[in-house]
Amino acid sequence: MADASPRRAADGVRVIFLGPPGAGKGTQAAKLAAHLGVPNIGTGEMLRTAIARTTPLGREARPIMERGDLVPDGLLVALVRERIAEPDCGRGFVLDGFPRTLPQARGLEEMTGGDPGRWVVFDFEVPRPVLMLRLSGRRWCPSCQATFHLVNDPPQRPGVCDVCGTALVQREDDRESVVARRLQEYDERTFPLIEYYRTRARMVPVDGNRPMDVVFHELRGAVEVRV
Ligand code: AMP
């Protein structure tokens, strides 16, 4: 009976991760996408790759990201439109960090031709002091983009990426002054999306201030509910 089976990638699952920086979206989005067998589309990571390759997009985005501002909607919508047109997205995708503004949300609906009624939107909530601690201790591999934390998730050898052996650094935008600006952008421009999706999609509030595997268990359950 098709309608009694769990939601699977073949159903064209579309998942959005909303939440402030440091809430754990990136880690969970990657795990969930792997679990569902669909691509994980992380716009922050795509932009950092463009910066590393000094593409025109990277050159434009770099100073904006270093200030903690959001990159213009038109660039992001074009980036995601191109990515989801690729064949591997035909069975669905997980979006981490997009949309972050109302025009981006509308752009996503337009490019998918879709009513978001069956999309799952995870809304991560984490207290501000916890976000600050997570971001200040975050260390990042500039080569493969793996992420670690000095206290919560340290690499095996201090300062060295477990995956590729590159020296870890602090992301420019994880510095305290920039984090304040990123949180302000979240409050002013991304937070309104919670209200937007509350009536349009299947919103799932997530307490992100719990151990990683506990959070993941909850997310997995939410995408596998019978529909
Ligand atoms: P993230 O890795 O998701 O925290 O993103 C890092 C930075 O990339 C953000 O602070 C923004 O400057 C930029 N960025 C990522 N996704 C978006 C988006 N959807 N809209 C605008 N800027 C974005």
Image: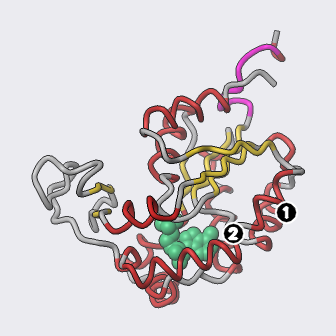
Instruction: Tell me the tag on residue 190.
Output: 2
Along the viewing direction, whichever of 194 and 92 lies nearer the viewer: 194
Drawn side of residue 161 relative to residue 41, left or right:
left
Of the residues tagged 2 and 1, which is closer to the observer? Answer: 2
Q: Quadrant of the N terminus?
A: top right
Q: Please, what is the three-letter code of the amino acid marked with disc 1? A: Glu
Residue 188 x %, y %:
70, 77
Along the viewing direction, whichever of 187 and 84 lies nearer the viewer: 187
Q: CA distance from mark 2 to mark 1?
A: 19 Å
Please determine whether, in this image, residue 219 is positioned above or below residue 154: above
Residue 69 x %, y %:
56, 84
The residue lying at 72 percent from left, 24 percent from top is: 225
Q: Please, what is the three-letter code of the amino acid marked with disc 2? A: Thr
Instruction: Tell me the tag on residue 21.
Output: none
Q: Quadrant of the C terminus?
A: top right
Dot 1 surroundings within 10 Å: few (below 14), some, or many (20 or more)?
few
Disc 1 residue: CB within 8 Å of ligand 1 = no
Along the viewing direction, whichever of 134 and 164 lies nearer the viewer: 134
Task: Indicate which disc, 2 or 1, sits on the residue closer to the N terminus.
Answer: 1
* Secondary structure of the residue carrying numbered label 1: helix
Query: From this viewpoint, is residue 116 visible?
Result: yes
Q: Quadrant of ligand 1?
A: bottom right
Please determine whether, in this image, residue 129 is positioned above or below residue 87: below
The residue lying at 59 percent from left, 81 percent from top is: 71
**Residues in magenta, as a range:** 4-11
The residue lying at 67 percent from left, 32 percent from top is: 223
